[in-house]
Image (cartoon, helix red, strand yellow):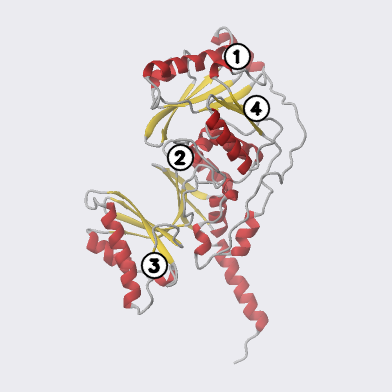
């Protein structure tokens, strides 16, 4: 039988084009309070059928969108691609449903895999046992088909799987991200319990940060808010610093497509302002300097050792976004005084600016002596927090509102930043 090479190549190209355009459902996981922000990110990225739920956003898109979601989303923790959804009455039923799948489509015999379980159910109340049953169903499938079983690997597996159970509804997914997306890859060192990168980015986006003015964080710690702010202002994708994503080990991985998206700099922007960070801890400032250097953002961020009582604004109007201490390592008297100092500094030295402060205790926020104009509930680690907005003004609030109506902000433009000065890391080869 003769085969026309041109026709054969055309058929391959047609199939590749079909695979590229084919849409499927995906799930973006996030943190409490950031669902709206993540949904907006997905819409701007080109996602379809965007729907929010508790700590997740559902959407549809093609393979290109899945790669872009991992590279560009700032408030997502991982992107899941569901394999199947089914109902199960017990763990034996769960085993049978998982065992009936053709696992050769998803995991090669020479690969390793890990399973993450999330369970909200009265029937299934032991997530670890769920993990064992799903693992047994997969490896038994290979044994019954006379194939070498893939390896189980808790750390750095090739394939990440996620099983989510709500009551009796089970969703089995491929995890396209692998390690949580909040782990950007720029962090050289960290202080004790630094703020989550995705939460920091979410706070900045909730505060309306786009790089339109100077930004200040007077409790910068290891520099997380500063670095995330610079990346937003410059349009740098947060995933650009990572060494790998889980989808790079999938059988249908399109390296050419991914490399094109990875090296696309069309989203980058000019940033004509500056970002300032300070902290009373010399240790924290040293770590922040290392992280800023690791991210290649020294040109846009300056840090210094300073007590909040001594902090002075570098510009007339700026945006302040900060995560002050919550009191876990300070006694109540000192922490109340700290927040009083924050309020005094903001009111008397930053008039005309806007501040957003997050804290787990409303007593501390009230001790600032400022009235919030907006309050958003967020989760920082295991702590329920309030993220408060303060419009800082001199005199009466009514007078301030009148002046704001006619105020126009015409930012001065500095020299154009060097786009390549960002320390992009070398990608590891698979």
Between tags 2 and 4, which lies in front? 4
- The disc placed on residue 62 is none
Where is mark 4, residue-wise? 214
Label 4 element class: strand
The percent position of residue 314, horizontal first and vertical second, equals 66, 21
Residue 385 at least partly seen: yes
> How far from the left and from the top, in percent, is residue 212?
66, 30
Is disc 1 in contact with disc 3, using a CB cutoff of under 8 Å? no
Mark closer to the chain start, 2 or 1:
2
Name the residue located 31 percent from the left edge and 62 percent from the top edge. 134
In primary-sequence order, the first of circles 2 and 3 is 2
Residue 272: image location, x then y, percent: 71, 32
| Camera-nearest label, 1 or 3 | 3
Is 407 situated left or right of 27 in this image? right
Residue under the point 41% across and 29% down: 385
In terms of secondary structure, where does tag 1 sit? helix
How far is the residue under mark 1 from the one under mark 4? 15 Å
Look at discs 3 and 4 and give the one toward the viewer: 3
Residue position for label 2 = 35
Sequence-first tag of 2 and 4: 2
Rounded to the nearest angstrom, the CA distance separating label 2 from label 1 is 34 Å
Q: Is residue 276 above or below residue 252?
A: above
Q: Nearer the viewer, residue 30 or 37?
A: 30
Q: Is residue 133 left or right of residue 415?
A: left
Q: Are there few (<14), some (14-19), or many (20+) residues within 10 Å of tag 1? A: some
For mark 3, what is the residue? 151
Q: Residue 100, can we see it?
A: no
Q: Nearer the viewer, residue 419 or 106?
A: 419
User: Residue at image x 52%, y 12%?
Assistant: 344
């Amino acid at each position: 039988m003769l085969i026309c090479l041109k026709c054969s190549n055309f058929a391959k190209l047609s199939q590749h084009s079909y695979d590229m355009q084919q849409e499927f459902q995906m799930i973006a996981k996030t943190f409490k309070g950031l669902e709206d922000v993540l949904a907006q990110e997905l819409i701007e990225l080109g996602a379809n059928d965007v729907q929010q739920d508790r700590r997740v956003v559902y959407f549809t898109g093609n393979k290109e969108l899945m790669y872009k979601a991992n590279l560009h989303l700032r408030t997502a923790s991982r992107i899941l691609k569901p394999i199947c959804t089914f109902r199960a009455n017990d763990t034996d039923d769960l085993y049978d449903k998982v065992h009936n799948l053709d696992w050769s489509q998803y995991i090669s015999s020479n690969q390793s895999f890990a399973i993450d379980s999330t369970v909200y159910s009265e029937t299934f109340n032991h997530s670890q046992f769920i993990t064992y049953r799903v693992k047994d169903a997969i490896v038994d499938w290979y044994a019954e088909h006379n194939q070498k079983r893939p390896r189980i690997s808790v750390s750095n597996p090739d394939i990440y799987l996620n099983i989510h159970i709500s009551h009796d509804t089970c969703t089995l997914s491929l995890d396209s991200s692998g390690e949580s997306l909040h782990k950007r890859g720029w962090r050289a060192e960290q202080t004790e319990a630094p703020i989550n990168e995705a939460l920091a980015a979410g706070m900045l986006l909730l505060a309306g940060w786009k790089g339109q003015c100077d930004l200040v964080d007077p409790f910068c710690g290891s520099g997380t808010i500063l670095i995330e702010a610079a990346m937003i202002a410059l349009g740098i994708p947060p995933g650009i610093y990572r060494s790998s994503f889980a989808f790079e080990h999938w059988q249908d991985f399109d390296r050419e497509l991914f490399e094109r998206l990875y090296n696309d700099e069309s989203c980058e922007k000019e940033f004509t302002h500056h970002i300032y960070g300070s902290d009373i801890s010399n240790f924290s400032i040293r770590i922040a300097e290392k992280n800023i250097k690791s991210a290649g953002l020294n040109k846009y961020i300056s840090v210094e050792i300073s007590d909040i009582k001594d902090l002075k604004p570098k510009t007339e109007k700026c945006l302040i976004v900060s995560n002050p201490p919550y009191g876990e390592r300070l006694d109540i008297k000192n922490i109340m005084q700290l927040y009083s100092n924050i309020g005094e500094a903001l009111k008397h030295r930053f008039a005309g600016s806007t501040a957003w402060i997050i804290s787990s205790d409303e007593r501390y926020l009230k001790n600032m002596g400022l009235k919030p104009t907006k309050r958003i509930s967020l989760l920082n680690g295991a702590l329920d927090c309030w993220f408060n907005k303060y419009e800082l003004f001199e005199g009466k609030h009514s007078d301030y509102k009148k002046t704001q109506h006619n105020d126009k902000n015409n930012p001065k433009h500095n020299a154009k930043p060097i786009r390549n000065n960002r320390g992009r890391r070398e990608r590891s080869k698979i």
